[in-house]
Image (spheres, rainbow, N blue to C red):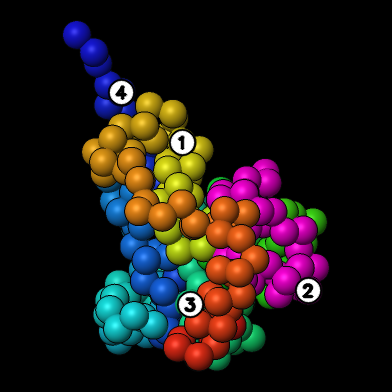
Amino acid sequence: MTELQTNWPHYVIGIVIYPGMTTLDIVGPQTVFAGLPNVTIHRVWKTLAPVTGDDGMVILPDTTFTDCPPVDVICIGGGRGQSAIIDDTELLNFLKLQGEKAKFVTSVCGGSEFLAKAGLLNGYRAATHWAARPLLAKLGVEVGTERVVVDRNRMTGGGVTAGIDFGLTVAEALYDEDVAKISQLLMEYDPAPPYDVGSPDKAGPELIEKAILYMAQTLGTTL
């Protein structure tokens, strides 16, 4: 009979949330993390007031920058609201403080820009949403095009849905491959999208051009 380990290490994971974030950036990883053994997850913001994402979903913080304990994993996502706080001193100081001591410093989508601004990606490769790669490069980061980029203890996911792949990568790093595989199976994560155009390499220049125009006209952003 197959036996599983029972004496799991305890990890504290801090997920930074903020107004205008893309909630799927953090909901994907949160779902993976919530299924891991012996973890404590904190959703962190300046206050305990509800935070509304760029899709209208509301997330509740459970601790603040001031009260958050030291974390083993610090994570932040991107979103249309990030441009308004990309230079926020309180946020960047929190990331820097936690990131300097964390076991893993992580992000999904445009969250890597916050890490770069906090000085946490100096000398590291990182991923971001494909449309934000030029911006991340301007911040002095070597940009990777993989869905998840792992560079020592920096783990960064690409755009939005890459957060699930990212979460499973973190799960393996914290525990082992079996835990990550079990998590994937229990989530029934077996993507089979209706269109095979989910990355710039697959989409082609014409669709990319349309997507950039769509972002500007419909979403009011170019990422």
Single out the mark in the foreground, 4 or 3.
Answer: 3
Query: Mark 3 highlights which residue?
Result: 79
Query: Mark 1 highlights which residue?
Result: 172
Query: Mark 2 highlights which residue?
Result: 138
| Residue 65 spot, x, y in % from top left | 46, 76
Separation of marks 2 and 3 at Cα, in angstroms = 18 Å
Q: Residue furthest front?
A: 206
Separation of marks 4 and 3 at Cα, in angstroms = 38 Å
Separation of marks 2 and 1 at Cα, in angstroms = 31 Å
- The circle drawn on residue 56 is none
Separation of marks 1 and 4 at Cα, in angstroms = 14 Å
Single out the mark in the foreground, 3 or 1.
Answer: 3
Q: Which callout, 2 or 1, points at the residue further toward the start of the chain?
A: 2
Q: Amino acid at mark 1?
A: Glu
Q: Amino acid at mark 4?
A: Gln
Q: Amino acid at mark 3?
A: Gly
Sort mark 3 into few (<14), some (14-19) or many (20+) by Cα contacts within 10 Å. many
**Are circles 2 and 3 on residues that touch, CB within 8 Å?**
no
Single out the mark in the foreground, 1 or 4.
Answer: 1
Q: Amino acid at mark 2?
A: Lys
Separation of marks 2 and 4 at Cα, in angstroms = 45 Å
Q: Secondary structure at mark 1?
A: helix
Magenta highlight range:
126-155
Residue at the (46%, 86%) spot, across then down: 219
Q: Which quarter of the figure has residue 49?
A: bottom left
